[in-house]
Amino acid sequence: MIYHIVMWQFKEEIEADRKPELKAAMAENLCGLVGQVPGLLNAEFVTHPIPSSTHDMALVTTFAKAEDIAGYSSHPAHQHVANTYVRPFVHNRACLDFEM
């Protein structure tokens, strides 16, 4: 099993009252890629990190094999979701891929 974890922080100009709705849209659309993107087995979106966290939200995805991450990254459905619901609102992206 391959894990792909991505974390983000909101851009400073994002108003606090918009953050819950933006997180909800990110969660719905990123998790909705399961079944659309080959090799993407599961997706979970973390909306409420504990106070010791350095990022505002995270996406934890699983794949059948490491090569599937590249296909996911370039898949048109993923690109649409990332460009519409994620990238305009975030910065300081961190990523960790690993096998267990």
Image (tube, grey):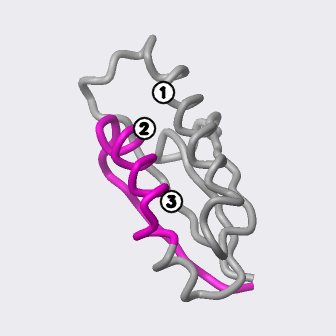
- Nearest the viewer among 82 and 90 is 82
Q: Can you give x and y, in whole percent of width and height, for residue 75 in the image?
A: 46, 66
Q: Residue beneath label 2, please?
A: 85
As drawn, is 22 to the left or to the right of 64? left
Amino acid marked by disc 2: Tyr
Q: Can you give x and y, in whole percent of width and height, for residue 97 in the image?
A: 55, 77
> To which quarter of the image does residue 17 belong?
top left
Quadrant location of the C terminus?
Answer: bottom right
Q: Residue beneath label 1, please?
A: 22
Query: Disc 3 versus disc 1: distance between alpha carbons?
Result: 16 Å
Q: Residues within 10 Å of mark 3 (few under 14, many from 20)?
A: some
Magenta region includes residue 80: yes
> To which quarter of the image does residue 61 belong?
bottom right
Magenta region includes residue 66: no
- The reply to whether discs 2 and 3 touch (Cβ–Cβ < 8 Å) is no
Residue at 63 percent of width and 59 percent of height: 36
Query: Disc 2 versus disc 1: distance between alpha carbons?
Result: 7 Å
Task: Tell me the magenta residue range.
Answer: 72-100
Helix, strand or loop at mark 3:
strand
Nearer to us of marks 3 and 1 is: 1
Q: Residue beneath label 3, please?
A: 6
Helix, strand or loop at mark 2:
helix
Lower sequence index among marks 2 and 1: 1
Residue at 39 percent of width and 56 percent of height: 79
Q: Is residue 53 placed above or below 5 in the rendered structure?
A: above
User: What label does residue 71 carry, if any?
Assistant: none
